[in-house]
Image (cartoon, grey):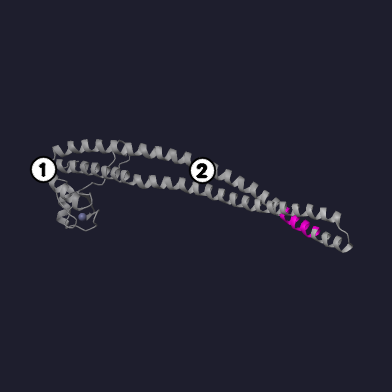
């Protein structure tokens, strides 16, 4: 298929520019992706911290109950000593009453200590789980960061290669055609060419005049879209495939 030499090069140039744009976009996304990885670690650390906090809280409550147990133990031994020395039946009953009250209080505190011990086992296990999760997340994030750095290096290398290829293409282009391409590219978000298909600019979707489309189909001249100014190119439909189409190149 015949095509204007400049037009052919513009298609290459556009491919290079679009690839460079993709590479730059990926590079620009890097800080955001790195932040997201750091956020994953921070979240896992938060889980560990909150599990530890719950454990500490539970241990503090348990210590309070242990103090209560010790307090009543002290009172009980004092009451038992006093019980040995009582003179009257009334005194004896009074002290028995004190002993029974202290025993009940101590029993309640001991139950509470036991409950907190069991809770402590669960909370300790939860801390260990959270720490294991953090370690696993750290490993994954380290791997992801490594991949991210490798990707950045790849994009930078691609950009260098694309720039070199672009310089080659630019050298061989008619300067006025290059100027038009650059101008449209700048004004149209980096897309300076557009396929003309079925009489329509596929980028801005505006229908062209039939005569313009007829000219565009020939791929002989540099023609621009009236609406978006992009430079048109035409991709002929593959001829109706004969039975032995396998030998025919694609497009
Ligand atoms: Zn257009």
Asked if residue 104 lies in the magenta stretch, the reply is: yes
Position of 46 compared to 5: left or right?
A: right
Q: Could one spot residue 113 in this view of the protein?
A: yes
**Which type of secondary structure does the marked residue at label 2 adopt?**
helix
> Of 113 and 197, which appears nearest the observer?
113
In the image, residue 170 sits, relative to residue 73, either above or below, namely above
**What residue is at 72 percent from the left and 53 percent from the top?**
71
Q: Which callout, 1 or 2, points at the residue further toward the start of the chain? A: 2
Q: Which residues are magenta?
A: 99-111
Q: Position of residue 182 (x, y in %)?
A: 16, 47
Question: Mark 1 — residue?
Answer: 175
Q: Image quarter for residue 95?
A: bottom right
State how far apart marks 1 and 2 are (Cα): 59 Å
Q: Is residue 56 magenta?
A: no
Q: Nearer the viewer, residue 79 or 218?
A: 79
Nearest to the observer: residue 123 or residue 179? 123
Residue 91 appears left or right of 195: right
Residue 185: percent from the left, percent from the top? 19, 49
In percent of width and height, residue 78 lies at 78, 53
Q: What residue lies at 53% left-to-right and 47% top-to-bottom?
A: 48
């Amino acid at each position: 298929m015949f095509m204007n030499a400049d037009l052919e090069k513009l298609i290459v140039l556009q491919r290079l520019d679009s690839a460079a744009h993709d590479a730059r976009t990926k590079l620009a996304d890097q800080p955001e992706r790195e932040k997201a990885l750091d956020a994953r670690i921070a979240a896992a650390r938060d889980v560990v911290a909150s599990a530890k906090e719950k454990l500490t809280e539970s241990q503090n409550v348990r210590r309070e109950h242990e103090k209560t147990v010790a307090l009543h133990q002290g009172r009980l031994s004092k009451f038992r000593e006093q019980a040995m020395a009582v003179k009257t039946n009334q005194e004896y009953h009074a002290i028995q009453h004190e002993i029974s009250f202290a025993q009940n209080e101590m029993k309640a505190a001991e139950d509470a200590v036991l409950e907190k011990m069991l809770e402590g086992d669960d909370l300790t296990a939860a801390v260990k789980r959270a720490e294991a999760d953090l370690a696993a997340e750290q490993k994954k994030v380290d791997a992801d960061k490594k991949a991210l750095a490798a990707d950045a290096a790849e994009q930078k290398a691609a950009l260098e290669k694309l720039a070199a290829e672009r310089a080659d293409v630019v050298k061989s282009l008619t300067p006025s055609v290059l100027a038009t391409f650059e101008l449209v590219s700048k004004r149209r978000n980096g897309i300076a060419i557009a396929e003309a298909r079925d009489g329509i600019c596929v980028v801005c979707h505006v229908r062209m005049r039939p005569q313009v489309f007829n000219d565009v189909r020939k791929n002989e001249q540099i023609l621009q879209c009236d609406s978006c100014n992009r430079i048109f190119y035409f991709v002929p439909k593959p001829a109706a495939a004969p039975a032995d189409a396998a030998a025919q190149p694609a497009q």
